Amino acid sequence: MDKFKQKFLYNKASKISYNKVKVPTLIPTLNILKQSAPKIEYPHIIIRYKTLKIMYIFKHKHDLNMYYKLLPYIKRYLHIEIENSTNFDICIAIYVDENDLEILNNNLKKPLMILHGEPNRVFNTDIAQFVQSDIKKDHIYHCPTMCIWSTPSECQKTRLCSAIDSGKRKWRKLLIEKINQQIDIDLYGVGYGNPINGYHGGTPEKEVGLKDYMFSIGVEHQKITDYITEKYNDIILNECIPIYNGPSNINDFFLPCHIDIDNICYRHINYDFYIKNYSNIIENKKRILSKYNIFSYFCLIFYNDLLCERPLL
């Protein structure tokens, strides 16, 4: 069994029965009325996989927009289609909070599954306690690497290194500036007065700060086992080598190709090192699009009896 499969556990008892039900609206928003409160809108998309129709509900519209852009690339590996109907068999909520869970459980009356990309949020904090104690329960899973903020690109590499930073964490900015003293880095993001599109906003698409570069700096805001976000994924999707600060078990998911930010060998930041690692970059890009995204996680859970990480409930 390879390292990828070792990240999952068998649990055949996790199967859910599927009964079709009408939903109030089509994409892009699901309107839900909670008692006498105003309607609450959830951006959503219905995906058909084999005979199963899956409604994905997102906390924010920009999350849904990003996955719309990714779908053509993911469809190269998964036989999924957008379903233009009001029927679905199961609801999957992405990055929802406690209030959302209560509203969805009370109104959908359907099997509800939650995918979350932050292991500490799923297993240690309030959201887990809330699901356990207060509402109708189905499933919540930690899904490593599900966060993506850039579409893939294939581009001739003409520049050395970039960094994209929101400027919200002073320690991260200082770390990037320290590296910038050793090599020339093109700096992007709100923190440098050069905003680009992503979770923190901006006008050009995020790949503008990645596609032309051989290397890019990615710094997770926490070093937690299995916590891998767009700080790694977006760099790989744009075929760069990550100069990366993240979990110690990153190689459980991906082939080695990154440079550990705590042990940088600056003489490796060059064209020859990039070419040497290019095949691993391409394989890791394929893994993100075929295994490590919200659509493929569902297929693994229900069609292979495999659970992403461990089930909470």
Image (tube, rainbow, N blue to C red):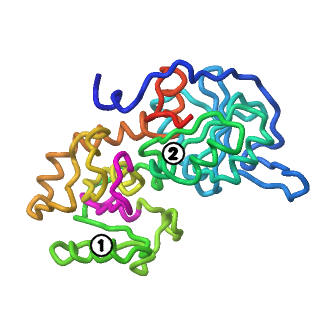
Q: Is residue 168 left or right of residue 110?
A: left
- The stretch in magenta equals 208-227
Q: Amino acid at mark 2?
A: Leu
- Judged from the image, the secondary structure of the residue bearing numbered disc 1 is strand
User: From what the image shows, is residue 50 above or below residue 146?
Assistant: above
Task: Report the residue at 78% width, 38% height from top.
Answer: 108
The residue at the far bottom in this view is 193
Q: Is residue 88 left or right of residue 270?
A: right
Could you tell which of marks 1 and 2 lies nearer the N-terminus? 2
Where is residue 63 drawn, in percent x and y?
Answer: 58, 53
Q: CA distance from mark 1 to mark 2?
A: 26 Å
Residue 62 is one of the magenta-drawn residues: no
Where is residue 135 drawn, in percent x and y?
Answer: 71, 42
User: From what the image shows, is residue 305 above or below residue 98?
Assistant: above
Task: Report the residue at 57% width, 47% height from top.
Answer: 128
- Judged from the image, the secondary structure of the residue bearing numbered disc 2 is helix
Mark count:
2
Q: Dot 2: few (<14), some (14–19), or many (≥20) neighbours within 10 Å?
A: some
According to the picture, the residue beneath numbered tag 2 turns out to be 70
User: From what the image shows, is residue 202 above or below residue 19?
Assistant: below
Residue 220 is one of the magenta-drawn residues: yes
According to the picture, the residue beneath numbered tag 1 turns out to be 186
Within the image, what quadrant is residue 14 found in? Answer: top right
Q: Dot 1: few (<14), some (14–19), or many (≥20) neighbours within 10 Å?
A: some
Q: Which image quarter holds the C terminus?
A: top right
Nearer to us in this view, 16 or 281: 16
Nearer to us in this view, 75 or 191: 191
